[in-house]
Image (spheres, rainbow, N blue to C red):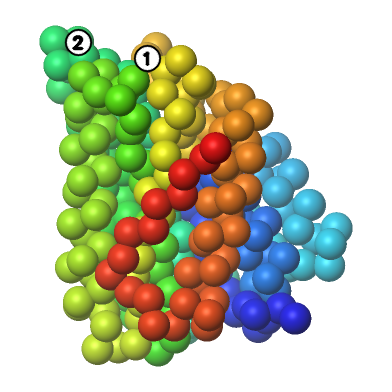
Amino acid sequence: MRPLGGKTALVTGASRGIGRASALALAQAGAQVLVHYCSEDEAADEVVAAIRETGGHARKVAADLRAPEGPHQLARRVRLIIGARLDVLVASAGIVRDASLEDTCVADFDELFALNVRAPYFLLQQLMPALCKGSSVVLVSSRSVDADVGQRAAYAATAGAIEALVAHFAHSLGTRGVRVNAIARSATGRAGGNMAWADLPRRHGASFEGETDLRSARQADDVGAAVAFLASAAARWITGEVLTVEGR
């Protein structure tokens, strides 16, 4: 049984880590997947190839979501591919930055909010006309463990913003039959390997997708499975919720 057969999904940050796992899980459930990436063209090609090898359908689409116009560009490109309807939107592109209050600079703070908060906000805004009754939106964030307290204050603020947006988005789109939820994965902490989810050029102090230990890789698969569940009719009565996925 393929619960998402005939559905179309967009996954941001889909070339690595959680985004990649989410794209593969949605494809396995039967969805046609648009694989968004920023800079890692070959990695995106690998995800598309992996989906097609199992009989699925996928295309890649590029945009830099850190740029103010990035979400608008991505939405336009997606609409040209899908036409009038988008069934699943998974906003998993994001960045984690380890920095104390004293070491956080304005540029780092702005980059965190640009990608983690502004991008999903305006991407959803621009794709609203394509979201119809039965569509599902899943935002991906994380909750830090004790080892991160004091080192990820700015990032934690973006995670809190995502949780607030879920409640507002679910209320605004609920009358149209569109469900909005979030997945808060449990960060492993600096001792266990940082885990983030965007294919962006590396900068000092930043954690990106791919820089994960085995435990984090397993957790990415678990998050992908949770994304596929929230996107399916099995979760049709769930909206406005934040589902925590705890890696063990």
The reply to whether callout 1 and callout 2 are in contact (CB within 8 Å) is yes
Query: Left or right of 229: which side holds 238?
Result: left
In the rendered image, the vertical position of residue 64 relative to residue 230, given as above or below? above
Q: CA distance from mark 1 to mark 2?
A: 10 Å
Query: Left or right of 109: which side holds 11?
Result: right
Q: Which residue is mark 1?
A: 205
Residue 40 found in image quarter: top right
Residue 128 found in image quarter: bottom left
Image location of residue 238, percent across then percent down: 37, 76
In which quadrant of the rendered image does the C terminus lie? Answer: top right
Within 10 Å of the Cα at label 2, are there few (<14), some (14-19), or many (20+) other Cα atoms? few
Task: Judge by depth and name the residue closer to the eye, 99 or 239.
Answer: 239
Q: Residue at x 70, y 48 (%)?
A: 47
Image location of residue 36, percent across then percent down: 54, 52
Going by the numbered disc 1, the residue's amino acid type is Gly
Residue 234 visible? The answer is yes
Q: Residue at x 77, y 67 (%)?
A: 56
Q: Secondary structure at mark 2?
A: loop
Residue 210 visible? The answer is no
Q: Which residue is mark 2?
A: 103
Task: Judge by depth and name the residue closer to the eye, 68 or 236.
Answer: 236
Query: Left or right of 48: which side holds 211?
Result: left
Going by the numbered disc 2, the residue's amino acid type is Asp
> Does label 1 or label 2 sit earlier along the sequence?
2
Image location of residue 42, percent across then percent down: 70, 37
In the rendered image, the vertical position of residue 90 relative to residue 31, given as above or below? above
Residue farthest to the front, as pictured: 248
Q: Secondary structure at mark 1?
A: loop
